[in-house]
Amino acid sequence: MLILHSPVDMHVHLRQGPMLSLVAPYTARDFAAAVAMPNLTTPVTDAEQVLSYRESILAAVAGHVFEPLMTLFFRPFSRQELQAVKPHILGVKLYPSGMTTHSETGVAELDQAEPTLALMEELDIPLLVHGEACGFVMDREALFLPVAERWARNFPRLRIVLEHLTTRQAVTLLDRVDRMYATITLHHLLLTLDDVLGGLMQPHLFCKPIAKRPEDRDALQQAALAHPKVFFGSDTAPHPVEAKEAPGCAAGIFSAPVALPALADFFEQHKALDRLQGFVSDQACAAYGLRPPRKEVRLVRETWTVPRRIGTVVPYLAGKPLNWRVDACT
Ligand code: DOR
Ligand code: ZN
C-alpha cells in the first residue's frame, strides 16, 4: 500500500460545460488541488471570469475535498488589474500565440510581454509558461529557452514555471536559473515521437509540445525521479473522440483517470516509490508556498485495466493494465 499526502496536479485542462462535468471528478477524486488552465474557448482574462470559472469547477466536483487553483490567461495587464486579481489566482499563464489549443489570442511578440512581466515580478505573481516559440515543431521548446533565460535575467525575482518540459536542454536550464521551476507530465515520461508517429499514427498520443527523442525522455525521467525544482503537472487535456480521430487531430491527452496509478508504476519500476510524494506534492508546495487541503490518497497494488472509453473521451493508456489502483481518499 502507498499513501500520498495531498497530491496536487499542477497543470490540468478541466474544460467547460458537459466536458467539465465528465472529466473534473477524476482530478478531484485523486488530487487535493489542481492548477486549472485558462485556455477556454473564450480565455479567462479577468477577475470576473476567474471567479465564475472557479464556481463552475466547484459545482462539477461537489463532494470531493478539492481546491481548484486558478490561472489567468496572459495579456497586457495594468498594475490595478493584477492587484485586484492576485488574491484569486496562483499565477498567470502565458501562451505564445498559435502554439496549442485556444492560444490564438496569446502573445505574438514575446518581447512585448516584458512590461507585464515587470509588474508580475513586483507583485510576486508567478509566470506559468507554455514554453514553445515559432519554428520547426521538434525545436520549438529549445527555441523558447533563450527567451525564458532572458526573462529570468531581466526579472530575477519573478518565479517562472516552464510547463510540460519535453527536452534535455530545458532540464539543464533549471540548474542555471535560480527562480525557475518546471512541470513534467506523465505522458512525456513514457513517450517518444516514435510512439506517436513511428508506426501507425496514434491520435490519442498526440499533444503539444510533441513528445521528443529517447534522450529527452530519459532526461525527463531522471528529473522527475530526483530534481527538487520539478513537479507533476499532468496536462490532462481531453478532447471528444471525434476531434481526435479526425483529420486535423486535436492536441491533448486525457490522463487524469490514470495519473497516480501510472506514476506509481513508473516510480516503482525505477525503485523510487519513496520519491513520489515529493514529485506529486512537496516540491510544488515548496516552489509556490502552497498549502493544499489535507487529503490522504491510498493506492493499493492491484492490477486493473484502464477503460477504453470514458464518456466521449478515450483516456490515456486505454485498455492497458496498471499495477496500482487508487483505493480510497480521505
Ligand atoms: O496537447 C495539449 N493540449 N497541449 C496544450 O498545451 C493544450 C492542451 C489543450 O488544451 O488541449
Ligand atoms: Zn496544458
Image (tube, rainbow, N blue to C red):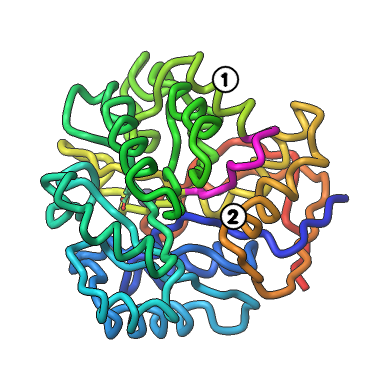
- Give how far across and how far down residue 200 sits, in percent: 33, 19
**Which residue corresponds to the image point at 67% horizontal and 55% vertical from the top-left?**
281
Q: Note whether 322 is above or below 310 in the view shown.
A: above
On residue 59, which mark appears? none
Q: Quadrant of the C terminus?
A: bottom right
On residue 287, which mark appears? 2
Which residue is under mark 1? 218
Q: Mark 2 near ligand 2 (CB under 8 Å)?
A: no
Residue 318 visible in image: no
- Give how far across and how far down residue 204 sits, in percent: 37, 38
Specify the quadrant of the image occupied by residue 305: top right
Q: Is 178 contained in the magenta span?
A: no
- Give how far across and how far down residue 100 sits, in percent: 24, 45
Query: Mark 1: few, some, or many residues within 10 Å (few <14, many ≥20)?
Result: some
The amino acid pointed to by label 2 is Ala
Q: Which residues are magenta?
A: 224-234
- First of labels 1, 2 by sequence position: 1
- Give how far across and how far down residue 193 sits, in percent: 38, 20
Q: Nearer the viewer, residue 312 or 269?
A: 269
Specify the quadrant of the image occupied by residue 135: top left
**Which residue corresponds to the image point at 49% horizontal and 70% vertical from the top-left?**
69
**Which residue corresponds to the image point at 39% horizontal and 43% vertical from the top-left?**
152
